[in-house]
Amino acid sequence: MAVQVLSRRARLRAETSAEIRATALKLMAEGGPDAISLRAIAREMGMTANAIYGYYPTRDDLVTTLIGEVYGDLVRQAEAARDAADGPAARLLAWARAFREWSLANPEGFRLIYGDPVPGYQPPPEGIEPEQRACADLVELVVAAWPTAAATQSHGDHRWEDFDPHVTADLRAEHPDLPPAAVALALRVWGRMHGLVTLEVYGRLRAQTMQPGKLYEAELDDLVRSLGLN
Amino acid sequence: MAVQVLSRRARLRAETSAEIRATALKLMAEGGPDAISLRAIAREMGMTANAIYGYYPTRDDLVTTLIGEVYGDLVRQAEAARDAADGPAARLLAWARAFREWSLANPEGFRLIYGDPVPGYQPPPEGIEPEQRACADLVELVVAAWPTAAATQSHGDHRWEDFDPHVTADLRAEHPDLPPAAVALALRVWGRMHGLVTLEVYGRLRAQTMQPGKLYEAELDDLVRSLGLN
DNA sequence: ATTGCAACTATACGCCGTGCAGTAAAAATA
DNA sequence: TATTTTTACTGCACGGCGTATAGTTGCAAT
């Protein structure tokens, strides 16, 4: 007998929910994260704003869901670029370039993900999933470079206890000899990418340079060299 | 004869204007930049919201003014720390640490300065003054390190035309032999500081490490080493 | 004393999120 | 098939917001 995976009701429900998210993303693309208003979504969909409350208990919940989706899109794109490249240096560069390119192509999405959280919003203590994945990606890329990078790093006074076990547990099991400085390095690499891209997306570099891309490439070049990858 | 610098009218006017800004900053410290609402300010001051329109033509103008003030405070603090230190390395470190410390002490101010601009807001093409000063500070610090830093930098393909003349004109007059790569380096240094501090202020590092300060120190250590300053 | 202007208030419009009460249709049950 | 329950939705209301327009009050210069 054919199992009815989703009842008619559940199917309609899922479709409406998806339409809400799609409409919200469209509004965001046009007017930034602030343009995501329940009333505007409902207007666009020919509904009442209150109807949305049957799908998301509050505007912030909807936005949180969207953050997860959009962040996931970013990470998938970066990973796809990485997977199309060979070797530690090329993979890191591909990931980093895809990160910037996605951010410039989706500035409003970038704002949604990394911008001001809704007032009072606290992310779950274990972090949001795509962000953990992005961090894991970077740790993995740094670990791949660690044979050459270790020599260039002053190991500082990093300890395993400094880091969240969520981040490090699997890692330590797989790489028992890895020092905590490698994780610190990965987070610092994140910071370097995040810094320049944020400044560029938010237009802070426009008053300084006409070629922010050159800046980013110079940074990546320095990064790869400092990891001993060339 | 005693020149009356400010008429009674003008004095009252200036005082009210200052009270508006102070109240706005207080509200921001309590509830973040979003809590800056004309109605709330007026309520706090025992006025009508519309009274504020006599001082600032729009909410965004008020916020823009506040950004300038707060940004100026940040820069002054960084410069004060720098001026209390001796030598290129110590001065850079002092500036960088003061930048982070101010940001952590004034997270809402940081959001105001660097967070999502009000929708539709475009900063003046010549940039806002305190930001230009911060950039100039960093350029100056990098220039001081350039004798040792030049060797470590791959000069890339930076050109003077890549950069805004506002930023470079005075600089080139004072340091005719300086290559454009030095300015690029200064902007990249800005990016490195901005990246980690942004991640920390926005709580993105909380899910990763308990010791974001160690991360920042490691980054600065790497930075100083890459500038050949130790 | 009169005029003029500056500071302020009152009212109103259209946004917003959201709580509560009601309704119509679909689904489940009998 | 008839009845009950559940679900999806609408309507209305409240209080918040920025801000435009018009009216009011009091000080200052004439």
Image: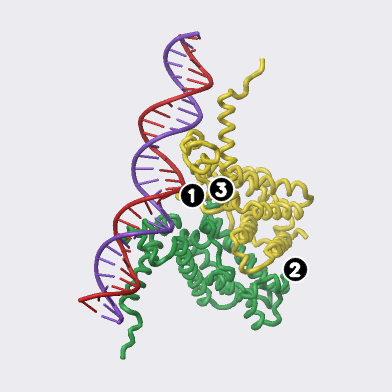
Chain colours: A yellow, B green, C red, D purple
> In the rendered image, which quarter is residue A7 located in?
top right
Q: Residue at x 56, y 30 (%)?
A: A13
Going from the N terminus, do you reach mark 3 or mark 1 first?
Answer: 1
Residue B131 lies, with reference to residue C16, above or below; the image says below
Q: How far apart are marks 2 and 1 (CA)?
A: 41 Å
Residue B139 is labelled as none
The residue that label 3 is drawn on is: A164
Can residue B104 be seen in this snapshot?
A: yes
Nearest to viewer (mark 3 / mark 1): 1
Residue A118 is labelled as 1
Foreground pick, B159 / B10: B10
x%, y% of residue C9? 29, 59
Within 10 Å of disc 1 (Cα), the crowding (few <14, some 14-19, many 20+) is some
Are labels 3 and 2 assigned to the same chain? no
Circle 3/circle 2 CB separation < 8 Å? no
Nearest to viewer (mark 2 / mark 1): 1
